[in-house]
Amino acid sequence: MIGLGDLGVVESVEVAADGNLEVAILPTFLGCPALPAITASVREVLVRCGHPEGRVRHVLAPAWSSDRISERGRTALAAHGIAPPAPSDAPEPVRLGLGTPCPYCGSLATRPHSAFGPARCQSMLHCAGCRETFPLMTAM
């Protein structure tokens, strides 16, 4: 659906002093339950690509933010029913109280449904237009 690069989780891929590849990843937030699975997946890719001694390092600076999600990543999230937050430098349209665009029908007639979503980095919204409930990736 979406790669770690498009999600903005990969901070760097470098050759370490010992000659092995080292991938630095940024957790989307501290305590992310997906971090062990993400780390294992990156290690598997390193091994498959011929770098069995490659390492994955978790870094906290710079802090991950939803601004790191690429346009391709935002499109992929929306295509799978997850509303990505707008980049912080995007001009905020005047919405007159209307909500986040629905990833299914595009309606702005959305409202909060639950602060808790399928992952700790998501909340749930409800669309009055198509009556779907969908996750919103929260800006960190």
Image (tube, rainbow, N blue to C red):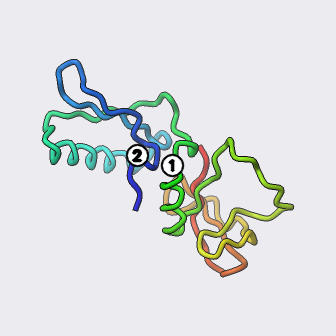
Q: Which residue is located at x 46 percent, y 43 percent?
A: 8
Disc number placed over residue 70 in the picture, else none: 1
At which x and y percent is residue 87?
63, 47
Q: Determine whether 18 is above or below 22 in the image.
A: above
The residue at 66%/71% (across/down) is 106
Could you classify mark 1 by the number of other residues whose Cα lies within 10 Å: few (under 14), some (14-19), or many (20 or more)? some
Q: Which mark is residue 5?
A: 2
Measuring from the top left, give residue 74's x and y in whole percent: 53, 56
* Nearer to us in this view, 125 or 106: 106
Which image quadrant is residue 134 in? Answer: bottom right
**Residue at the image point whose x is 68% and y is 65% from the top:** 101
| Tag 1 near tag 2, CB within 8 Å | yes
Q: Earlier in the sequence, mark 1 or mark 2?
A: 2
- On screen, residue 74 above or below 5: below
Residue 43 - label: none
94 or 126, which is in the foreground? 94
Q: Kindly identify the residue that appears in the image at 86 percent across and 61 percent down.
A: 96
Task: Please tell me how crowded label 2 is: few (under 14), some (14-19), or many (20+) other residues with Cα within 10 Å.
Answer: some
**Circle 1: residue type:** Ser
Residue 59 in the image: x percent, y percent?
41, 30
The answer for how far apart the CA atoms under marks 1 and 2 are is 8 Å
* Place of residue 22 in the rendered image (x, y in percent of width and height, measured from the top left): 27, 31
Q: What amino acid is labelled 2 in the image?
A: Gly
For the C terminus, the quadrant is top right
